[in-house]
Image (cartoon, rainbow, N blue to C red):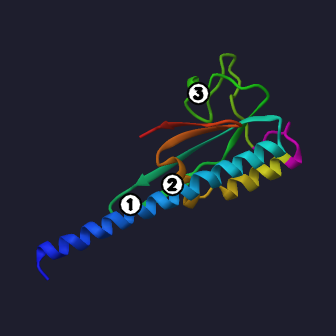
Amino acid sequence: MNTESFQKYVKTAEEAREAAKLAIKNVAMPAAKALMAAFFEAHPEVCAVAWSQESNHYDDETYSYRVSSPRIRLGEPIDWSSVNGAYDEDDDGNDVFTDEYDDKLSSGLKSDLSELERLMTEEIFRPAFGEDVFVIATRNEFHVTDKS
């Protein structure tokens, strides 16, 4: 086999890889939407869920990817374009989002938030939203901010 023949195989393999990534994304985004829709339906008091997704490249051999613990906003929505992270504060110095450790949350909401976190896996959320992003899910849409 010569170089030209090998390059045909390389091109075929690259096309297959891109097709596989697209197929995964086409499954991942509907799965993420369905998960969030079910969470919002179960908890109408929640208007938004926020989290970060990030990759760490320590060196050529060490790579990690993580979806942070989800944080929620209760009550009324705000202007999401002004929110830069899950730990932001509003103009009055109050946290925009809260987490499962907030004593004001019901045990059912705390339990479901913990279960939501367990299901927010790299296999679904990375292809759906990407790497190094901050995501706010609302009842109607996802706001994704690139943090890279």
Q: In this view, does 42 lie to the left or right of 29?
A: right
Quadrant in the picture for residue 28: bottom right
Q: Is the magenta stretch mostly helix, strand or loop?
A: loop
Q: Residue 18: which numbered mark, if any?
A: 1
Q: Which of 98 and 41 is in front in this view?
A: 41
Q: Residue 83: which numbered mark, if any?
A: 3
Q: Which of marks 1 and 2 is nearer the N terminus?
A: 1
Q: Is residue 17 left or right of residue 85?
A: left
Q: In this view, does 84 lie to the left or right of 140?
A: left
* Residue 61 visible in the picture: no
Mark 2 is surrounded, within 10 Å at the Cα level, by few (under 14), some (14 to 19) or many (20 or more) other residues, namely some
**Of tags 1 and 2, which is closer to the observer?**
1
Q: Mark 2 points at which residue?
A: 127
Q: Position of residue 139 (x, y in %)?
A: 71, 37
Structural distance between the alpha carbons of marks 1 and 2: 12 Å
Q: Identify residue type, mark 1.
A: Glu
- Residue at image x 70%, y 52%? 35
- Residue at image x 61%, y 29%? 88
Q: Which of marks 3 and 1 is nearer the N terminus?
A: 1
Quadrant in the picture for residue 31: bottom right
Structural distance between the alpha carbons of marks 2 and 3: 23 Å
Q: Nearer the viewer, residue 90 or 122?
A: 122
Task: Kindly state the secondary structure of the residue where label 3 is placed.
Answer: loop
Q: Identify residue type, mark 3.
A: Val
Structural distance between the alpha carbons of marks 3 and 1: 33 Å
